[in-house]
Image (tube, rainbow, N blue to C red):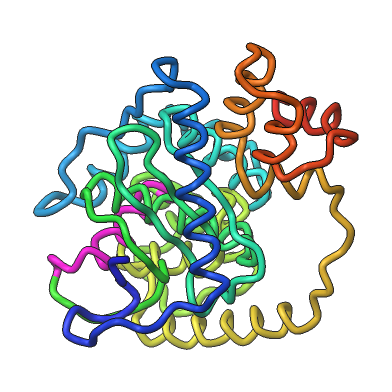
Amino acid sequence: VHDFRRLPDAGTAPLSSGLRHEIRLATTRREILLNVLGAEALQTRLPQVRIENADPENVGTAIREHLGVTITEQKTWRRPDVGFRHWRDALERIGVLVFQTTRVDVREMRGFSFVEARFPVILLNGGDAHAGRTFSLLHELCHLILHDGGLCLPGDERHAEGADHEVLCNRVAGAALVPAESLRAEPAVRRVSGRENWADEDLAALAREYSVSREAVLRRLLIIGRTTERFYREKRQQYAAEAAAREADNDGGFVPPFRQALNRMGRLYARGILEGFYDGRLSASDLSRHLGLKLKHLADFEEAAYQA
């Protein structure tokens, strides 16, 4: 596993048993899907764009266009969970498997990817906020384009040379999610040529416009010269403290088993396994085992998997 969580000369850190299990599960599911679909497996169509030595804004635009996500559509979502679902669907449409973990600490892993010609995999931390997962999703897509998948903490600030792939992937992910041209055109941004301090309600409003986090918006404001490094650092610490408090107070809540299963495996994998069952290539017991779901939940699972 290529470990991008640390600088290249810092060595690697051991992986928890939970994370090792999730990585094995992701690779196994990919192999199962390939075996089930065979020659009918969807051809993966990654964006053909150069990331290294390129303008991140142009790369972000190219990725967005390849995925077929417009600013107009994005601004109708208005919620991070809705935004995450749409971005995930967009990647699955081009043949990228997007799985989610359970019970892995976000401080250990926010995103993981491994490169394959057919059905490359992105593994996201299901315990992360939806806005965080969206950023990690685009970050890991950049790693797939660069052909260097690995273990990441997307969004983590680190000072390195411009060729550092974590820095590049962070920058391109931000540009894809919140294009500079669109952000500059926002009324709250257009009214001033430069502003050091931003009110929380203004940052929250901009975050809702793009269904991203306040930190992602603030980072983009810093990049386009609408705030300062000092203010960005202060707010980043505030957001980290708030996230820690939410995590401590979050007791989860009941999620139906079929919904839990679909959230973990994604629609691309789910539909492929269902098609294998309907075509007679899988037995009912195979179906239950590959989905990790009791057959009594199948009707609800199927409806959710094909829901628009």
The residue lying toward the viewer, choosing from 129 and 271, is 271
The image shows residue 157 at horizontal and vertical percentages of 35, 78
In the rendered image, the vertical position of residue 90 relative to residue 206, given as above or below: above
Q: Kindly identify the residue that appears in the image at 33 percent across and 62 percent down.
A: 150
Q: Kindly identify the residue that appears in the image at 34 percent across and 45 percent down.
A: 181
Q: Kindly identify the residue that appears in the image at 49 percent across and 33 percent down.
A: 92
Res. 59 image quadrant: top left
Q: Is residue 32 left or right of residue 261?
A: left
In the rendered image, the vertical position of residue 185 relative to residue 236, given as above or below: above
The residue lying toward the viewer, choosing from 62 and 189, is 62
State the predominant SS element of the stretch in magenta.
helix
Q: Which residues are magenta?
A: 162-178
The image shows residue 107 at horizontal and vertical percentages of 52, 79
- Of all residues, the one furthest to the top in this rendering is 279
Q: Quadrant of the N terminus?
A: bottom left
The image shows residue 192 at horizontal and vertical percentages of 41, 63
Asked if residue 119 lies in the magenta stretch, the reply is no
Asked if residue 171 lies in the magenta stretch, the reply is yes
Q: Kindly identify the residue that appears in the image at 30 percent across and 71 percent down.
A: 4
The image shows residue 284 at horizontal and vertical percentages of 76, 27
Q: Quadrant of the C terminus?
A: top right
Q: Is residue 3 left or right of residue 155?
A: left
The residue lying toward the viewer, choosing from 180 and 96, is 96
